[in-house]
Image (tube, grey):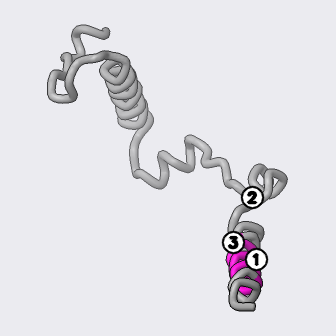
């Protein structure tokens, strides 16, 4: 009788834990149909206004960010240690 009680309690508790996880999943994770309709796409002009940048400043910042992204991707593909970072001139 002791084993049967233990088995029933185990099944009840594990079902409760899995049920709580499922409830959290369904309430917190957005569905695929929800995401595209509710994610705001920030336009470049709105971003410029938000940052307070002129066209030249914004384009310079975008160019710098693009170069930095290429630099990071280049160094991520190498087998070198993390402290052995190559300069920008090697990838441009």
Which residue has dot 1 on it? 15
The residue drawn where x is 37% and y is 31% is: 65
- SS of the residue under disc 1: helix
Find the residue positioned furthest to the left: 83
Asked which quadrant contains residue 57, the reply is top left
| Dot 1 crowding, Cα within 10 Å, few <14, some 14–19, many 20+ | few
Magenta stretch, main secondary structure class = helix
Q: Are marks 2 and 1 in contact (CB under 8 Å)?
A: no
Give x and y (percent) for residue 5: 73, 89
45 relative to 53 in the view: left or right: right
Question: Rounded to the nearest whole Å, what is the CA distance between mark 2 and mark 1?
Answer: 34 Å
Q: Answer left or right for 77 relative to 7.
A: left
Residue receiving disc 3: 21
Question: Residue 67 appears at what percent x and percent y?
Answer: 35, 22
Q: Which residue is mark 2?
A: 38
Dot in front, 2 or 1: 1
- Between residues 19 and 11, which one lies in front from this camera angle? 11
Q: Which residue appears at 39% of the width and 23% of the height?
A: 73
| Viewport quadrant of the N terminus | bottom right
Task: State the extent of the magenta-drawn residues as a range.
Answer: 8-21
Towards the viewer: 20 or 77 = 20
- In the rendered structure, which disc, 2 or 1, sits on the residue that comes first in sequence? 1
Q: Report if the CB atoms under discs 3 and 1 are less than 8 Å apart.
A: no
Q: Which is closer to the viewer, label 3 or label 2?
A: 3
| Magenta stretch contains residue 15 | yes
Kindly identify the residue that appears in the image at 67 percent across and 54 percent down: 40
Whichever of labels 3 and 2 marks the residue nearer the N terminus, that label is 3
Q: Is residue 90 above or below residue 16?
A: above
Q: Earlier in the sequence, mark 3 or mark 1?
A: 1
Calculate the distance from the C-alpha at mark 3 to the C-alpha at mark 1: 10 Å
* Alpha-carbon span between mark 3 and mark 2: 25 Å
Q: Which mark is residue 70?
A: none
């Amino acid at each position: 009788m002791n084993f049967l009680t233990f088995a029933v309690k185990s099944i009840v508790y594990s079902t409760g834990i899995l049920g709580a996880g499922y409830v959290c999943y369904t309430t917190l994770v957005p569905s695929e149909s929800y995401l595209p309709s509710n994610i705001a796409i920030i336009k470049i002009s709105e971003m410029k206004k938000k940052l307070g940048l002129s066209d030249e400043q914004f384009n310079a910042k975008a160019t710098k960010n693009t170069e930095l992204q290429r630099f990071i991707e280049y160094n991520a593909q190498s087998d070198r240690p993390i402290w052995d970072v190559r300069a920008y001139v090697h990838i441009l």
